[in-house]
Amino acid sequence: MISSPCKNCERRNDPKDECLKSCKILHDVQEFHLMTAKSICYSAIDCTEESRYHIKSPSPAAMSPF
């Protein structure tokens, strides 16, 4: 299970629109989502105290170089 990248951030209560411009972790999560969007094999819904979010992750077979 992937936990929210904002969970332990000191700016976790700030509006995410402000963080999107400068946060490397949020940028990497978005990039991962864009790279794997065409070959999604697994998805799940998780939640934090603040909100629910959808997690998409490729299966191990999709990540295999062979």
Image (cartoon, rainbow, N blue to C red):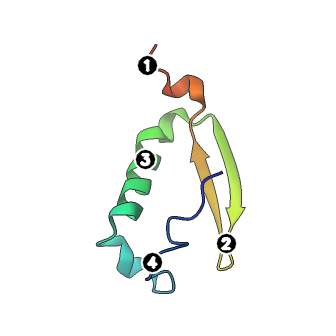
C-alpha span from label 2 to label 4: 14 Å
Foreground tag (2 vs 3): 2
Foreground tag (3 vs 1): 1
Q: Which residue is mark 3?
A: 32
Reply above or below: 11 against 47. Answer: below
Labels 2 and 3: the sequence-earlier one:
3
In screen coordinates, is 9 left or right of 19?
A: right
Q: Which residue is mark 1?
A: 65
Labelled disc at residue 43:
none
Helix or strand or loop: what does disc 4 sit on? helix
C-alpha span from label 2 to label 3: 20 Å
C-alpha span from label 3 to label 1: 17 Å
Mark 4, Cα crowd under 10 Å, few <14 / some 14-19 / many 20+, is few
Image position, residue 23 (x, y; %): 34, 69
Image position, residue 27 (x, y; %): 36, 60
In screen coordinates, is 11 left or right of 39?
A: left
- Residue at image x 55%, y 72%? 7
Q: Which residue is mark 2?
A: 48
- Residue at image x 49%, y 21%? 64
- Residue at image x 43%, y 47%? 32
Reply above or below: 27 against 15. Answer: above
Q: Amino acid at mark 3?
A: Phe
Labels 2 and 4: the sequence-earlier one:
4
- Residue at image x 53%, y 26%? 62
Helix or strand or loop: what does disc 3 sit on? helix
Mark 2, Cα crowd under 10 Å, few <14 / some 14-19 / many 20+, is few
Helix or strand or loop: what does disc 1 sit on? loop
Residues under numbered marks 3 and 1 in contact, where contact means CB atoms less than 8 Å apart:
no
C-alpha span from label 1 to label 4: 34 Å
Q: Which residue is mark 4?
A: 16
Image position, residue 5 (x, y; %): 50, 65
Residues under numbered marks 2 and 4 in contact, where contact means CB atoms less than 8 Å apart:
no
